[in-house]
Image: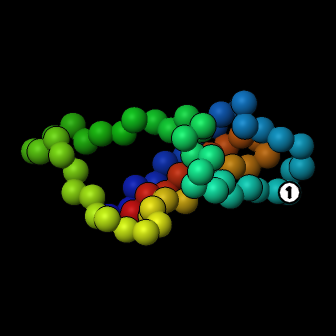
Amino acid sequence: MYLRQKWRDARLSFGSADEQRSIRAYVWDDIWVPDTFFRQDISSSAATYDITVENKFLTISNTGEVWYVQK
């Protein structure tokens, strides 16, 4: 399952109009991400897997638009 979210955070905007930035995993703890949950979830514990690299991708546009994808 892929969870894709998009929002705008003006605090993350920067100068160049034709540029996007991908964020390294160690910076993610400093960026606000919505606390998404599923209302009709039967169990409150999510299945997670032990992996070497997290299956997340975060891109920020110059306007502060954040595109967040998690697998």
**Pointer 1: residues within 10 angstroms few (<14), some, or many (20+)?**
few
- Quick one: which residue is furthest to the left in this view? 42
Quadrant assignment for the N terminus: bottom left
Total labels drawn:
1
- Residue 39 % position (x, y): 21, 37
Kindly identify which residue carries mark 1. Answer: 18
Query: Residue at (29%, 64%) from the top-left corner?
Result: 49
Query: Residue at (11%, 45%) from the top-left corner?
Result: 43
- Residue 25 % position (x, y): 57, 55
Query: Residue at (59%, 51%) from the top-left corner?
Result: 26
Q: Amino acid at mark 1?
A: Asp
Query: Residue at (45%, 62%) from the top-left corner?
Result: 54
Task: Depth check: give the residue in front, 28 or 65.
Answer: 28
- Residue 12 % position (x, y): 72, 37
Q: Is residue 22 visible?
A: yes
Element marked by disc 1: loop
Left or right? Give the position of 45 relative to 56.
left
- Quick one: which residue is furthest to the bottom in this view? 52
Q: Is 52 above or below relative to 13?
A: below
- Quick one: which residue is furthest to the right in this view? 16
- Residue 28 % position (x, y): 57, 46
Quadrant assignment for the C terminus: bottom left
Task: Depth check: give the residue in front, 49 or 67.
Answer: 49
- Quick one: which residue is furthest to the top in this view? 11
